Amino acid sequence: DVKVTQSSRYLVKRTGEKVFLECVQDMDHENMFWYRQDPGLGLRLIYFSYDVKMKEKGDIPEGYSVSREKKERFSLILESASTNQTSMYLCASNPAQPYEQYFGPGTRLTVT
Amino acid sequence: GNSVTQMEGPVTLSEEAFLTINCTYTATGYPSLFWYVQYPGEGLQLLLKATKADDKGSNKGFEATYRKETTSFHLEKGSVQVSDSAVYFCALRNNNNDMRFGAGTRLTVKP
């Protein structure tokens, strides 16, 4: 069964802290993605990766970075968390073909 | 650029009512179209998909037909249940592997 896991379901951090969100998939997928989900805005792509050590900016990369050292793991890093980064963060992966994405359960991050 | 527009919610229906959630898209080329569902507290799950014009995707009583002439992919179900209460997202993927999501429509079904 396809599985994408995220390290935390809920996280509370203080402004200025460095935050790591981890995502692991067990399907040997090439492509991995980080989105944030906000009410009325749907899902917005932050970063994605087509292969190990490769990364591409999505629509809203500012304030974020990513790391993909192993094929199964894709980390999202908030270098200095700010209150406007309070959101639901969703990780997804898909194989090269077909294109449907598989999602993790999400991490609800609150920055105070 | 590619984009998806879906009807704003929330949508509230009684059990056994007919459901339609409208979705239209703008895209270059020939995108694949998807409906995802998000149940409370969970991530998104693929509900159905269609990869070319006139294809009909179906799953769990839900259906959507890829209409290239109207650039639409409306989601329908003949008789909704309380367990269908969720947020529904329309999405497209173009040939460049670029995925775009609509804003989501929250459906609440009352007994």
Image: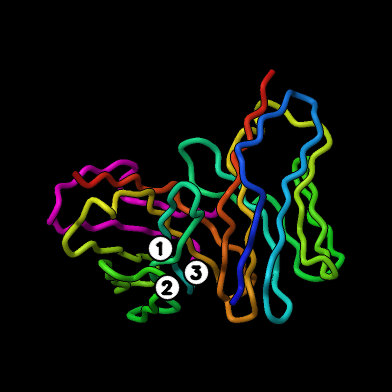
Q: Are marks 1 and 2 in contact (CB under 8 Å)?
A: yes
Q: Nearer the viewer, residue A76 or A87?
A: A87
- Identify the residue at image location x=75%, y=41%: B60
Identified by mark 1, the residue type is Trp
In the image, are marks 1 and 2 on the same chain? yes
- The numbered dot on residue B19 is none
Tag 1 residue: A34
- Of marks 3 and 2, which one's residue comes earlier in the chain? 3
Label 3 to label 1: alpha-carbon separation: 14 Å
- Of marks 1 and 2, which one's residue comes earlier in the chain? 1
Q: Nearer the viewer, residue B3 or A22?
A: B3
Label 3 to label 2: alpha-carbon separation: 19 Å
Identified by mark 3, the residue type is His
Is residue B110 toward the left or the right of residue A35 in the image?
right
Residue B90 colored in magenta in the image: no
Percent coordinates x, y for residue A103 in the rendering: 50, 55
Percent coordinates x, y for residue B82 in the rendering: 67, 26
Q: Quadrant of residue B31?
A: bottom right
Eye-nearest disc, 1 or 2:
2
Instruction: Identify the element where label 2 is drawn.
Output: loop
Is residue B4 toward the left or the right of residue A66 in the image?
right
- Identify the residue at image location x=25%, y=67%: A63
Q: Are marks 3 and 1 in contact (CB under 8 Å)?
A: no
Is residue A109 toward the left or the right of residue B57 in the image?
left
Tag 3 residue: A29
Residue A17 colored in magenta in the image: yes
Tag 2 residue: A58
